[in-house]
Amino acid sequence: MTTTRFAPSPTGYIHVGNLRTALMNYMIARKSGGSFILRLDDTDQERSKQEYIDGLMQDLDWLGLHWDRVEQQSKRMDRYAEAADQLRATGRFYECFESPVELDLKRKKQLNMHKPPVYDRSSLHLSAAEKDAMRAEGREGYWRFKLDLERIEWPDGILGDISIDAASVSDPVLIRADGQVLYTFASSVDDVDMGVTFIVRGADHVTNTATQIQIMKALGGTPPSFAHHSLLTGTEDEKLSKRLGALSLRDLRGAGVEPMALLSMLARLGSSKPIELAGSIEELIAGFDVGSFGAAPTKFDADDLFPLTRAHVQGLPFARVQARIAALRVPADQAELFWSVAKGNITILDDLAGWWQLFRDGAEPLVDEADRDFVAQALGLLPAKPWTTATWAEWTAMVKEATGRKGKDLFRPLRRALTGRDAGPEMADVMPLLQVIRGL
């Protein structure tokens, strides 16, 4: 069975870059009838917070991306210790004592000699006595994985065939001196234990993938298939990370972006397929093909979400918005008419409040000085309530006959006087909803 996972660190709110990864893994699992795991990478207990866990679950639930089970790395520390012992027993784990300053000096020396800044394994052959001496000096040991110095190859679902020479990569640190298990190790153990068969993640993880393939094999596991999607950038090709605070899903939701607009964009962004509003997540899943995505950095513009949101919102049936309209205290006998009149003039559902306020309380009239006498005369000809869809035509016919005005010189000043706007719904439809006309 296909098993995928989304493994965010709960150290902040989920953003569009996270969502793109989650959505791809979710669709792969659902398209094949497989399993989708939400795995919380919370080994950093100082930065991981319950409010972020709650927040990311709420965001995924809002989008309709429902997981099959939740795993939490902070509850698997005994398992990581067991796996570390297994690697020590096979000679693939070794303790190191260099300080960050010493490592930085080594890197600078290698670069000055035009050599790749790869760890020199100087701690690999330390004797027990030498290690004791290091500890006596107050040094704390951390643990690296000993890579097999061979080419690491895999057929990437997006990037094509990948081949990385392990000799060009430093033996990765898997456990810090303070005992914190790092992502590269915990993720490898989890992917083996949980039977993950396919992983989609960002192209910035390619080197991690190479080392994790060896770690998984050293643990006796079979590495999954991998696909590395392009990274998102801003409209000016800047790193999106500089703006992620404004692109959290909670902020986009607060701005009125609809789930289907967001999913429709991220399910196609960076692929060979055009971005189109989908009617359902099932439609997106049916058309998803990870091989259609490219490797080039992909521009993301949050403003592009609003035309998709507008199209989604304007296509909603009354039943889907009935409760929201009722919350505005629109009379029940006018609710459906209100929706039919307002929906073509909104981008987000929150815009409904402004239209109902206009109909309920009247608008501040917009009247040009040259039209002031004309508008006053026209308002004097307005028929008494109740106003119907026929009222506009009847009234403007009387005004035309009385003033001689016609066309836009007739209709535009009256629209602006009644609604305070230059454009909007058909005025024939507006009249039955108007409770008040200011100036009368």
Image (cartoon, rainbow, N blue to C red):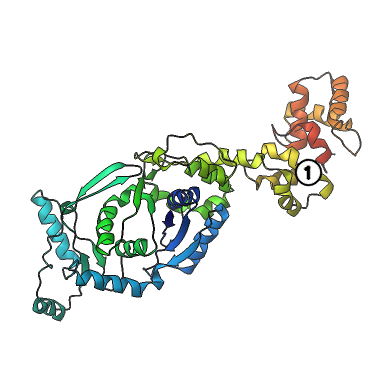
Q: Quadrant of the C terminus?
A: top right
In this rendering, position of residue 223 left or right of residue 171: right
**As drawn, 25 above or below 238:** below
Residue 64 pos. (x, y %): 56, 53
Residue 319 pos. (x, y %): 73, 47
Residue 430 pos. (x, y %): 79, 36
Quarter of the view holding residue 79 = bottom left
Residue highlighted by disc 1: 336
Residue drawn at point x = 27 percent, y = 42 percent: 161
Q: Dot 1 lies on which element?
A: helix
**As drawn, 390 above or below 229:** above
Nearer the observer, 350 or 222: 222
Residue drawn at point x = 9 percent, y = 79 percent: 129
In this rendering, position of residue 387 left or right of residue 260: right
Farthest-out residue, front: 1
Residue drawn at point x = 26 percent, y = 65 percent: 174
Residue 337 pos. (x, y %): 79, 41
